[in-house]
Amino acid sequence: MSIISIKSPKHCGKQGVNVEKVSKKLVFAGSALFTTILSIILLVWLILHPTKPEFSLKEADIYLLNLSNVNLLNSSIQLTLFSKNPNQKIGIYYDEIQVYASYKGQQITLYTSLPHFYQGHEDSNLLSASLVGTGLPVAPSFGYEVERDKTAGRLILNLKVNGRLRWKVGTWVSGKYRLNVNCVAVMAFGPSLPTGPLSAKQGTQCSTSV
């Protein structure tokens, strides 16, 4: 003969209360652990205090800046940048780096991608890029602006770097942060200059935002 045991609603109610208490304890323990880990990461981050990388313009040469009758631009620019990681205990991974040139707020070359690389503590690198534009549409005022600069005796370009970076502390690597760099190149420009590329070799510090 089999014995069937039936629990009263009273007993079921007590068992449910115990499960609820255990669940609350697990949630509390998980939250406490997460908060502790987050606090440790934040503390390490504040102690190390990462400083954004430094960029400066080493050289920029314009080999071609030719505007057609229908406001299409062909351009060729050679660029060299100096990049430095000023941090003593933090490395930097550079990802998805793209470089281009602009003039008076207009993009005058296509994006040129640079290979991803790692920069160690207080390390530095030279970054070179060939920037080219073929048949890029520009504003009707582009030619007028260039002639004005020619009369003034100087041409000003903005050389820009966009990408992502990750901080490395020991074996820990952060998520990706947006990197924006803007370098201003001032070049002598005028009818009396000898033939050849327009050049800027000044070591100008670039503005950097992360």
Image (tube, grey):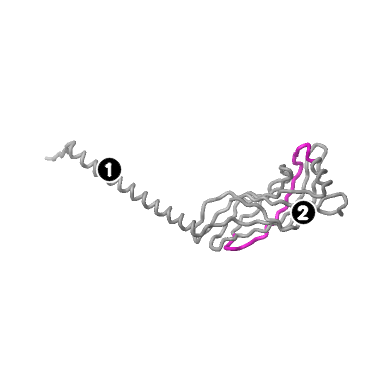
Extreme residue in the front direction: 152
Point out residue 121 in the picture as x, y percentages from the top left corner.
57, 63
Residue 58: give its label: none
Q: Residue at x 27, y 45 (%)?
A: 21
Secondary structure at badge 1 equals helix
The residue labelled by disc 2 is: 61
Give the residue at the far left of this rendering.
1
Mark-to-mark CA distance, 2 and 1: 71 Å
Residue at 55%, 63% in the rendered image: 88
Question: Is 198 covered by the magenta stretch?
Answer: no
Per the rendered image, the range of residues in magenta is: 119-142
Which residue occupies 79% across, 42% down?
A: 145
- In this rendered view, identify the residue nearer to me: 88 or 73: 88
The residue that disc 1 covers is 20
Dominant secondary-structure state across the stretch colored magenta = strand
Residue drawn at x 24%, y 42% as measured from the top left: 17
